[in-house]
Amino acid sequence: APYRLNETGLAVERVIATKAPPAGPTGVMEQENAYLDLLRSAAGYRIVGGTLAVIDGDGRVVLFFTAEP
């Protein structure tokens, strides 16, 4: 998905996924949809050390990533 980034702002645009159900376990598609919804809500970010926090428009951390060594 395309995104826009500046010093504190983050916007993820046109997040899309296939409609075909995954061949994996039950609930995987629901998890994917929930993740994509959170990604769409991104309005900002913070990086501290090896971690990235994605923040929504209300200032809540909605996604959290840790770098692998």
Image (cartoon, rainbow, N blue to C red):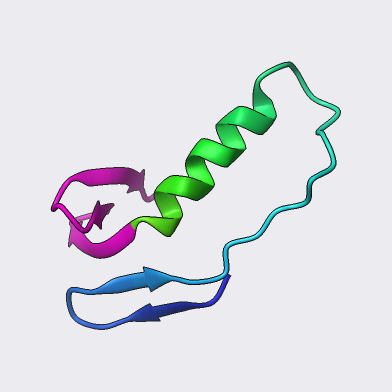
Task: Left or right? Give the position of 67 relative to 1.
Answer: left
Task: Left or right? Give the position of 15 relative to 19.
Answer: left
Task: Left or right? Give the position of 20 relative to 49.
Answer: right
Q: Looking at the image, which is closer to me, 68 or 62?
A: 62
Residue 59, magenta (yes or no): yes
Q: Is residue 55 above or below residue 14?
A: above
Q: Residue at x 37, y 50 (%)?
A: 67
Q: Looking at the picture, how far across and down is residue 40, in whole percent?
A: 44, 58
The residues colored magenta run 42-69
Q: Looking at the image, which is closer to me, 61 or 51?
A: 61
Q: Is residue 7 above or below residue 46?
A: below
Q: Looking at the picture, how far across and down is residue 25, in whole percent?
A: 75, 18
Q: Quadrant of residue 1?
A: bottom right
Q: Residue furthest top?
A: 26
Q: Looking at the image, which is closer to me, 51 or 9?
A: 9
Residue 63 seen: yes
